Amino acid sequence: MRAIKNLSPEEIKQLRYFAFQQGSSVLQKRCQCIIYSYYGLSARELMDLFNVDRRSIYNWMDRWEEGGIQALKDKPGRGVKPKLSLECQEQVERIKQAFSLYPNNMHLALKYVNSSLTVPISRDTLRRFVKRLQAASG
């Protein structure tokens, strides 16, 4: 059985701060796990408490031991990548062109935009992007 055995008063203070602050619930859960392990809860009890498997508990402990709070945080770049970006001028121009060619026909504008994309987008994605584009331009 693994457990976190040595935490300094400063580490406990830091873990408590992140465990009970508003923000990332994932980071809160990981910090709480480290604290509870330090106070004697077994891996089985932590698994039941946080509704995760043993490997997750051990991964969190390994990450804590390797790098503290920073290692418990999710690394950037996780999650679904956006299909459209305001920074991609080519995409922005293509969408503007689609709506100038088909101002009252979302279906044809979408078809025009999708003809130039490697991954097609949905009507809702296009609508959300146009809304963001309008907000960004003024």
Image (cartoon, grey):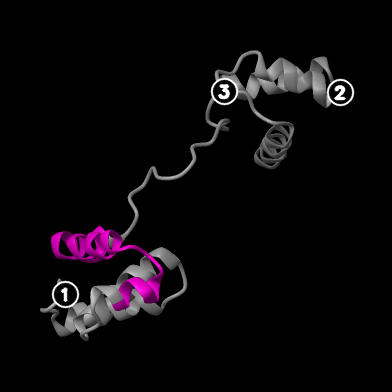
Look at the magenta stretch and give its main secondary structure: helix
Q: Amino acid at mark 1?
A: Ala
Distance (Cα) linking label 1 and label 2:
61 Å
Distance (Cα) linking label 1 and label 3:
45 Å
Q: Amino acid at mark 2?
A: Asn
Tell me where residue 58 appears, x and y as whole percent.
22, 63
Q: Is residue 124 left or right of residue 67?
A: right
Circle 1 crowding by C-alpha within 10 Å: few under 14, some 14–19, many from 20 = some
Q: Amino acid at mark 3?
A: Val
Distance (Cα) linking label 3 and label 2:
21 Å
Q: Which residue is mark 1?
A: 3
Q: Which residue is mark 2?
A: 105
Tell me where residue 115 appears, x and y as whole percent.
66, 13
Is residue 113 shown above or below 16?
above
Residue at 28% across, 64% down: 54
Q: Residue furthest left?
A: 6
Is residue 103 shown above or below 68?
above
Per the rendering, the mark at residue 119 is 3
Circle 2 crowding by C-alpha within 10 Å: few under 14, some 14–19, many from 20 = few
Residue at 38% across, 76% down: 49
Q: Give the camera-side residue of 107 and 91.
A: 107
Q: Nearer the viewer, mark 1 or mark 3?
A: 1
The numbered mark, 1 or 2, whose residue comes first in the sequence reads 1
User: Which of the 4 image quarters holds residue 59?
Assistant: bottom left
Residue at 39% across, 42% down: 77
Segment tinted magenta in the rendering: 45-71
Q: Image quadrant for the C terminus? A: top right
Q: Image quadrant for the N terminus? A: bottom left
Is residue 18 shown above or below 113?
below
